């Protein structure tokens, strides 16, 4: 059984992957401030910005899955230095840990903000699409830091032979109880959770912006399968899209939410076109499919039913 280190296993993404893979691997999961407990998982505290913290770790891991990172959705207020400290210095520390301990593989998560100018074009975003960062707003330094981290990772591949797999992800929908995130530094309820709660409790739902806008909506259980396939692949190298290739329109999302959560009762659907729209984009998944023999199995209805069965 392979020995895997998951750095950042206490958040929604890391914990969701660990829950799905805990029977396939011997996993050590790390946390920074939020301890967690999962059966058969070794839990250790690690601050990746501090080199000395890595002394608590073993050295016989077959791969590192690096999920930990500073991101706007987890940042109260606005402290851009955190992006530099965690997403650049922290990643450098992880890379040095892999190099010195001779760990052969690193899997990393990249934001889709690195190709933000490719939204709304109607053209599927390629794995190797040119970087087009938005250099204004509270996401700018975040995106800059993630891109810098990817360049550091590629350097360690070319210089030291580290196998590096970088997955570019949109929002990965999870089935945990973490329903809050930060928007412009203020704590909010996630939009899809608010919509579900409104359907269930108030028998109404608001459709903001353009209902035709469509986006990739990968589910945590599919994403965990992709991580498993990456852990087993000793050849794949570089950047891979980790979406679905099958974008879901806001209209389809709302109608499916009503079907799954309304219990057959009538729902008042109100259109608010002057409100902000969701992004409009999709990923080209051909390279990912070929490299990992991967195809998502959760469509939007299956995903929402699973969320309902898990959380309600």
Image (tube, rainbow, N blue to C red):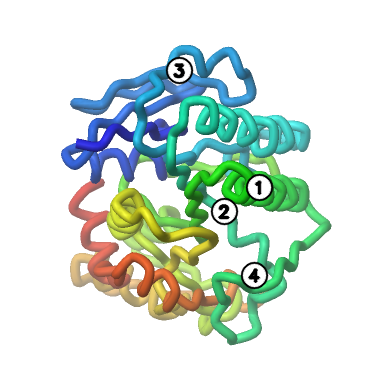
| Mark 3 residue crowding within 10 angstroms, few (<14) / some (14–19) / many (20+) | some
Distance of mark 4 from mark 3, alpha carbons?
42 Å
Front of the two marks 1 and 2? 1
Lower sequence index among marks 4 and 3: 3
Q: Residue at x 63, y 24 (%)?
A: 49
Query: Which of the labelled discs sits on residue 45, or is there none?
Result: 3
114 vs 301: above or below? above
Residue 30 location, x and y as percent? 42, 25
Real-space Cα separation, disc 2 to disc 4, in angstroms: 28 Å
Count of marks overlaid on the render: 4
Q: Secondary structure at mark 1?
A: helix
Seen as rendered, the residue at the extreme right is 136
Residue 98: numbered disc: none
Q: Residue at x 51, y 22 (%)?
A: 32
Q: Are marks 1 and 2 in contact (CB under 8 Å)?
A: no
Answer above or below: position of 180 versus 122. Answer: above
Q: Which residue is mark 2?
A: 110
Which residue is the site of mark 4?
275
Q: Which residue sits at x=62%, y=78%?
A: 273
CA gap between label 2 and label 3 equals 23 Å
Marks 2 and 3, the one that precedes in the sequence: 3
In this orientation, which residue lies closer to the viewer: 272 or 240? Answer: 240
Secondary element at tag 2: strand
Q: Which residue is mark 1?
A: 155
The residue at the point 28 percent across, 74 percent down is 266
Vertical relation: 113 (above or below) 39: below
Label 1: how many Cα within 10 Å (few below 14, some 14–19, many 20+) = some
**Distance Cα–Cα, label 1 vs label 2:** 16 Å
């Amino acid at each position: 059984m392979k020995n895997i280190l998951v750095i950042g296993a206490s958040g929604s993404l890391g914990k969701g992957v660990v829950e799905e893979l805990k029977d396939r691997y011997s996993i050590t999961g790390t946390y920074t401030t939020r301890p967690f407990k999962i059966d058969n998982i070794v839990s250790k505290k690690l601050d990746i910005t501090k080199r000395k913290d890595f002394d608590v770790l073993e050295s016989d891991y077959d791969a590192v899955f690096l999920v930990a990172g500073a991101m706007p959705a987890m940042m109260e207020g606005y402290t851009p230095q955190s992006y530099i400290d965690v997403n650049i210095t922290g990643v450098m520390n992880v890379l040095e840990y892999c190099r010195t301990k001779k760990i052969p593989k690193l899997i990393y998560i990249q934001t889709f903000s690195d190709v933000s100018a490719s939204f709304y074009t109607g053209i599927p975003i390629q794995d190797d699409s040119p970087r087009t960062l938005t250099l204004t707003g509270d996401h700018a330094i975040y995106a800059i830091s993630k891109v810098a981290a990817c360049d550091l990772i590629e350097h360690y591949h070319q210089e030291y032979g580290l196998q590096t797999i970088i997955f570019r992800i949109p929002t990965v929908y999870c089935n945990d109880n973490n329903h809050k995130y930060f928007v412009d530094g203020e704590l909010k309820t996630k939009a899809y959770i608010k919509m579900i709660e409104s359907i269930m409790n108030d028998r109404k739902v608001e459709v903001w912006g353009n209902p035709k806008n469509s986006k990739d909506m990968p589910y945590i259980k599919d994403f965990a399968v992709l991580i498993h396939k990456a852990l087993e692949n000793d050849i794949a190298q570089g950047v891979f899209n980790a979406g679905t290739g099958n974008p879901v329109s806001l209209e389809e999302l709302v109608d499916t939410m009503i079907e799954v959560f309304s219990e057959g009762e009538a729902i008042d659907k109100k259109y608010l076109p002057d409100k902000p729209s969701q992004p409009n984009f999709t990923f080209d998944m051909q390279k990912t499919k070929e490299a990992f023999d991967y195809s998502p199995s959760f469509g939007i209805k299956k995903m929402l039913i699973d969320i309902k069965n898990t959380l309600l």
